[in-house]
Image (cartoon, coloured by chain):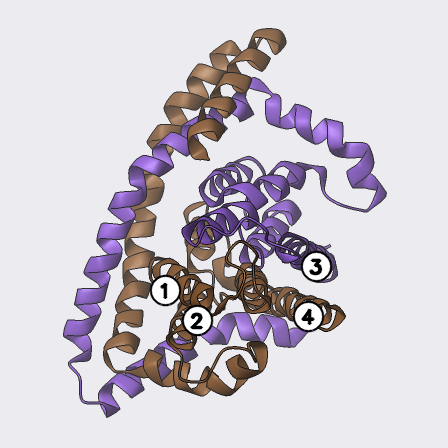
Chain colours: A brown, B purple
Amino acid sequence: MLNFLWGAMIFIGIVVAAFTGNMSEVTNQAINSSKEAVTLSITMLGIMSMWTGIMKIGEKSGLIKEMSVKLQPFLSWLFPTVPKNHKAMEYISTNVIANILGLGWAATPAGINAMKELQKLNKNKQVASNAMCMFMIFNMSSLQLISINIIAYRSQYNSQNPSEIIGPGLVTTLISTLVAVFYAKLREIKK
Amino acid sequence: MKIVTLISDLIMPLTIIYILSYGYSKKINVYETFIEGANDGFKTVLEILPTLIGLMMAIGILRGSGALNLLSLLCEPFANLIGFPKEAVPITLMRLVSSSASTGILLDLFKTYGPDSFVGRFVSVMMSCTETVFYTMSVYFLSVKITKTRYTLSGALIANFAGVFAALLLSKYLWG
């Protein structure tokens, strides 16, 4: 995806600049932006390391495991066709918890494993099952409680209050997730 | 709406104190574990630095050339119709396709308008409540070779737009 997108952005930018006469601005931006990426990373190094450090405590102490057990009844309601002790359930709950806590690197492998397990339960191997549709829609509705990276970016650009977006982010995440679950359940009943 | 502000102020300290107390109650070495985790985060940031350089450079070129402004201007009539800030149109579309490219635009918006401007605040909230639909779908479904995805795309898009509009309404209410 990015292989195409990245080149297209640069290509379009330079072609448009030829028409608008902004060529020198393009050169300046290319140089300054790449410099800025490094300054930004220095801010990110601090904030992200702080957060992953805290999360590691949650992981090692077994808090994340405990949370996924507590999530079980809700997940059974979301995925009625998946047996309770099936491997798929375990991967789904790991994926959901990782997404809620914003641990993207832990979410993707668990999510792919969940899909593989759901595929084993799936009757028609080319067509997505109800459980798969629910899992994907739920997953893509955004579950993250605290968008630590957005806070880091805001702080880098001198926001007066970088964390003021946590509350609104939480409310809107809840709304999009409710809409997702409602829609997926509705489509399940329809068929 | 004070409660939303209160959540913003409290959730980080509460999360940290909860995780810490849990760690102590399980008798693990919290400090060493923190350092270990921080080390992981450190490496992750260093690993994404080249990506960030590439994308910020590409978005910088788009911004410098005037192409981003052009796209915003093109979308202006429609954006005005629904009360959508026109500067936020490119990022809202890009958000569906690529996480890193939309992050690049986010940083560009922060730089151009400031994170505390209306657009800056709105896109911060919008980015927190949406996901990269097309990318995630292709990765997950490709991994199990599913070709018919039924109502997954429509569901993901509806949830995404619900998030975008909730973010817009709430931002207008809080900061508009």
* Circles 4 and 3 on the same subunit: no
* Circles 1 and 3 on the same subunit: no
Quote the CA–CA distance across marks 1 and 4. Answer: 24 Å
**Numbered marks: total:** 4
Quote the CA–CA distance across marks 2 and 4. Answer: 19 Å
**Protein chain holding label 4:** A
Residue in the picture at 36% in, 85% down:
A66
For residue A188, which numbered disc appears in the image? Answer: 4
Q: Quadrant of residue B162?
A: bottom right
Chain-order first, disc 2 or disc 4: 2
Of badges 4 and 3, nearer the viewer stands 4
Up/down of B77 relative to A159, above or below: above
Q: Quadrant of residue A187?
A: bottom right
Residue in the picture at 46% in, 67% down:
A118
The kind of residue tagged 1 is Ala
- SS for tag 4? helix
Name the residue carrying label 2: A92
**Protein chain holding label 3:** B
Residue in the picture at 49% in, 30% down:
A5
| Residue B46: x %, y % from top left | 25, 45
* Circles 2 and 4 on the same subunit: yes
Of badges 1 and 4, nearer the viewer stands 4
- SS for tag 3? helix
- SS for tag 1? helix
Q: Cβ–Cβ below 8 Å for labels 4 and 3?
A: no
- SS for tag 2? helix
Q: Residue furthest front?
A: A123
Chain-order first, disc 1 or disc 4: 1
